[in-house]
Amino acid sequence: MLSLGEPQVTAESPEADAGIAAFDAKLTRHRKSAGTARSHLRAFLAGVPGGDALVDDAQVVLDELVTNAVTHARVPRGRRIGIRFEMVRDHLRLEVHDASSEKPAIRRSTGADSESGRGLSLVEALSAEWGFMPRPEGIGKIVWALVGPEGGVA
């Protein structure tokens, strides 16, 4: 059984005043964490007006970001992955926090038969925008994506 800790719902965004809070949780660095993150996302979007229009693309994007953090973030044992969801106007901002400072990069030369390497290409295709930045705490990074009702820009 995964020890995920208690998710913390916060009210830091202007949208929180309108009844839509942000959602934060910490996940263990485990291959099953992507599924747990998707479950949290579905529950969050169920309470958001118009959330059903975002859920399909948002689940794929979140899955890829969490999977990348689990697979590629070379960090000391016991470090956890943070997830955050927040509505910003009509877009959903997804964030995945990890303790690795390694920059995410899209692999442009992935072969047709490759079983991996397409995650960030999917993120790019399904998101209105995406990027990364250092964590304010100084350790690691935040990879973020904006998912909107219009789909991705690609």
Image (spheres, helix red, strand yellow):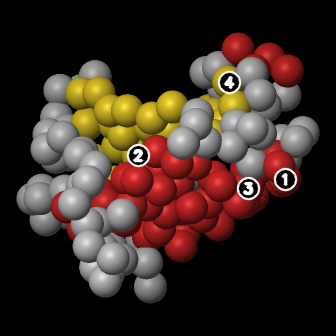
Q: Earlier in the sequence, mark 4 or mark 1?
A: 1
Q: Is residue 114 left or right of residue 78?
A: right
| CB-based contact (under 8 Å), mark 3 and mark 2 | no
Q: In this rendering, does residue 83 appear at all?
A: no
| CB-based contact (under 8 Å), mark 4 and mark 1 | no
Question: Which residue matches tag 2?
Answer: 96
* Vertical side of 91 occupied by 110: above or below: below
Q: Amino acid at mark 3?
A: Val
The alpha-carbon separation of the residues under discs 2 and 4 comes to 16 Å
The alpha-carbon separation of the residues under discs 4 and 1 comes to 16 Å
The alpha-carbon separation of the residues under discs 3 and 4 comes to 15 Å
Q: Amino acid at mark 2?
A: Val
| CB-based contact (under 8 Å), mark 3 and mark 1 | yes
* Vertical side of 76 occupied by 53: above or below: above
- SS for callout 4: strand
What is the x, y in percent for residue 60?
A: 56, 61
Question: Which residue matches tag 3?
Answer: 55
Q: Amino acid at mark 1?
A: Asp
Question: Which residue matches tag 4?
Answer: 88
Question: Which residue matches tag 1?
Answer: 52
Q: Nearer the viewer, residue 153 or 136?
A: 153
What is the x, y in percent for residue 139?
A: 16, 34
The alpha-carbon separation of the residues under discs 3 and 1 comes to 5 Å
- SS for callout 1: helix
